[in-house]
Image: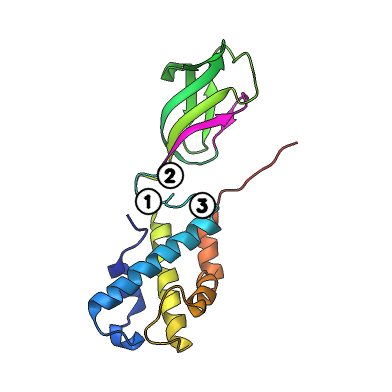
Amino acid sequence: MPYTSIGEVKALAKLSPSDLGLQSESEFDGFISKLILYAQSLIDSFCNLPEGFFEPGGIKVIGEEHDYSQPIRLNLRPIISIQTVEVYRGGAWQTLSPEDYTVDYKAGLIMIIGKAPALTGRSVRISYTAGYIETPEAIKYAAAQICVNMLHMTLQRRITPTIRLDDWAIRMVMPEALTQELQGILKPFMRRNVEVG
């Protein structure tokens, strides 16, 4: 499901199909739906998150391996749910029961309670769902506004009326559509990679 809707983009843009040299409402809708996909890609890339992270229900991560440490910091957060936590003991993966660990869902931390695995290197494997139950309002707004910015920049620059989204002109407009204001709105959602040691 997209981060924003065609209707939300149209309401913000206040443009008609003829403004862009398009012949029909359905042609305009098709153009906007492609812009939405580009806006989502721009947001995911800026936030350093996998494609579709902000879609309702989040994304599933299967078998993310970690060195044993306390606490274990998952790569993606917030966490919606934990499917399995496994530790490597005695030459095999063993699934822990939910009573054997605690979870800080917002921070993406797992603390294993009790006996540590015999090995510490890549001895914990976790499957989980990360993201949001519903697309955050700030993300919906940013996606719609990026689309509006692209529409208005296209109009201002008089890029050909029948615009193809893979044209060089659109590719050049896209980064400019992510304004400083929108970057500020997206900053709290950014994933920062921290290397230790």
Residue 158 is at least partly visible in this image? yes
Q: Is residue 132 left or right of residue 178?
A: left
Q: Which residue is mark 3?
A: 189
Q: Which residue is mark 2?
A: 131
Measuring from the top left, give residue 145's x and y in whole percent.
Answer: 42, 70
**Tag 1, which secondary structure?**
loop
Instruction: Please state, as top left, top right, bottom left or bottom right, where the N terminus lies in the image.
Output: bottom left
Residue type at mark 2?
Gly
Q: Main secondary structure of the magenta part?
A: strand
Front position in the image: 84 or 188? 84
Measuring from the top left, give residue 43's x and y in whole percent.
Answer: 48, 60
Q: Give the quarter of the image for residue 66.
A: top right
Residue type at mark 3?
Phe
**Tag 2, which secondary structure?**
loop
Q: What residue appears at the point 33 percent right and 88 percent down from the top-left corner?
A: 21
Residue 66 lies in the magenta-colored region: yes
Residue closest to the far right: 197
Q: Are marks 3 and 2 in contact (CB under 8 Å)?
A: no
Measuring from the top left, give residue 125's x and y in whole percent.
Answer: 52, 26
The boundaries of the magenta stretch are: 59-74
Q: What residue appears at the point 47 percent right and 24 percent down from the top-left corner?
A: 85
Q: Which residue is mark 1?
A: 55
Give the number of callouts: 3
Q: Are marks 1 and 3 in contact (CB under 8 Å)?
A: no
Q: What residue appears at the point 24 percent right and 81 percent down from the top-left corner?
A: 24
